Amino acid sequence: MILDFLLALIVFAFIITIVVSAHEFGHFLGAKKTKTKVTEFAIGFPPFIWKKQIGETLFAIGSIPFGGYNKIYGESEPVDNQKDPSSFTSKTTFQKFIIIISGVVGNFLLSILLFYIILFSSNLNSSVGLINPEYKFPFGHQENYLLIGDVREDSPAHLSGINKDEFILEINETRVQSANELNTILEQTKGEVIRVLTKQRETNLETVHTIDNKEAWLGIGYTSIANISYNSNLKDKVFSGAMHTYNFADYSLKTLGGIIADSFKAKDASIATNAIAGPVGIFAITKISLGEGFMHMLNLTAIISLALAITNLLPLPALDGGKCVYLFFQKINPRVFTDELSEKIDSAGFILLMCLGVLIIIKDIFQFKDFIF
């Protein structure tokens, strides 16, 4: 058990380091593109196990592998001499925007690259769990299935030979794609003998099971799964990684929006908070996913990178989205919205985000304690 915990911790640290380093490397390239000085770029945190000065930048690898950072001259501590052409403060609004937004772009590009690798290893097919089974992805050919996650002992499904990790395809040759369709068919065939066609998740082996549907109940737990295929035409094949990234972003935003709306409607904040995971929640998901294989871990990395990109686009202080909004106001009235005020707002925002992060960590420990320990 201890070895499993340590292995999960190592993999988790590796994933977080890759995702955060991609973000920081995006900022680094944005700075270089605008000829802004970067004094330090590090993967991991001090104490350093390797460092080397290359030109104006100190490159380093830290011994604490939970992210990375870079220091852009004049950004976090505005320099007095705004005429220094290598400082962040001397740049135009558009150049500052390029530097700030490049971190988000770095995470999007990492997700696209990883999704390309994942899709081409699976014949351009991908399965995504659906919280909302009515959701339709903007790109690709989508088919929904019910994936069996649990089979109750001595239930009709168990007695007929249906197993966990099988898809329900048809009942009496009628396609089943959602829980509503399953329940409707079971009610319509109550008291009859039905034929259930299933497919094994790993081998794709299809089996027909004969079940006496006495009570319109099979005795299974299931999850809605969408299988998305991008191999129908040349455009899908060429842009599959980008399309899949867009699909995931659209699905994540609309699902989160729906959860928040449900939380307000029910006047229950726990509906929204339980759907949000912090570092501890991500570690728990990593630990659960270790047995799924290398490609599954790549998929998790791509999703986390995309989540980081979307989160950083939020217009909140200390996040890239908030900094871009501040640039807009600074352009309108630079006398009021100074670099010094920006630093104060970012510092206050950072403290608030850290406090929120602590609350999420505490929530995750209680929510995922059975998976972590």
Image (tube, helix red, strand yellow):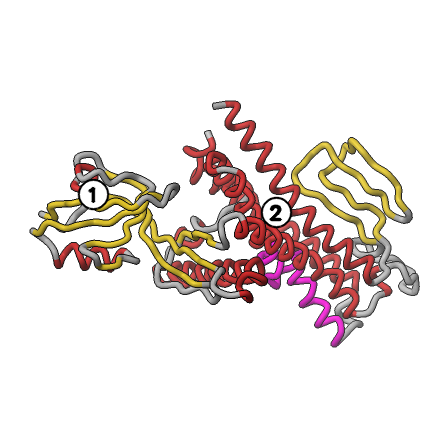
Relative to residue 13, is residue 150 drawn left or right? left
Assign a secondary structure to mark 1: loop
Q: Which residues are magenta?
A: 308-332
Give yes or no for residue 336 being in the magenta stretch.
no
Which residue occupies 43% across, 53% down? 128
Give yes or no for residue 324 being in the magenta stretch.
yes
Which residue occupies 14% across, 45% down? 211
Q: Nearer the viewer, mark 1 or mark 2?
A: 1
Q: Residues within 10 Å of mark 2 (few under 14, many from 20)?
A: few
Q: Given the image, on which type of amino acid does mark 1 rest?
A: Gly
Please give the residue where the numbered disc 2 appears in the rendered image: 354
Q: Is residue 312 or residue 249 the one in the foreground?
A: 249
Please give the residue where the numbered disc 1 appears in the rendered image: 219
Assign a secondary structure to mark 2: helix
Vertical comparison of 54 with 227: above or below: above
Q: Is residue 211 or residue 77 the one in the foreground?
A: 211
Magenta span dominant secondary structure: helix
Q: Is residue 246 or residue 260 the one in the foreground?
A: 246
Vertical comparison of 292 with 347: above or below: above
Which residue occupies 82% across, 42% down? 59
State the image coordinates of residue 187 (x, y, percent, origin top left).
14, 56
Which residue occupies 16% across, 41% down? 156
State the image coordinates of residue 96 (x, y, percent, origin top left).
77, 64
Vertical comparison of 342 with 60: above or below: below
Residue 50 image-quadrant placement = top right
Q: Is residue 283 or residue 166 the one in the foreground?
A: 166
Q: Residues within 10 Å of mark 1 (few under 14, many from 20)?
A: some
Residue 14 image-quadrant placement = top right
State the image coordinates of residue 150 (x, y, percent, origin top left).
29, 40
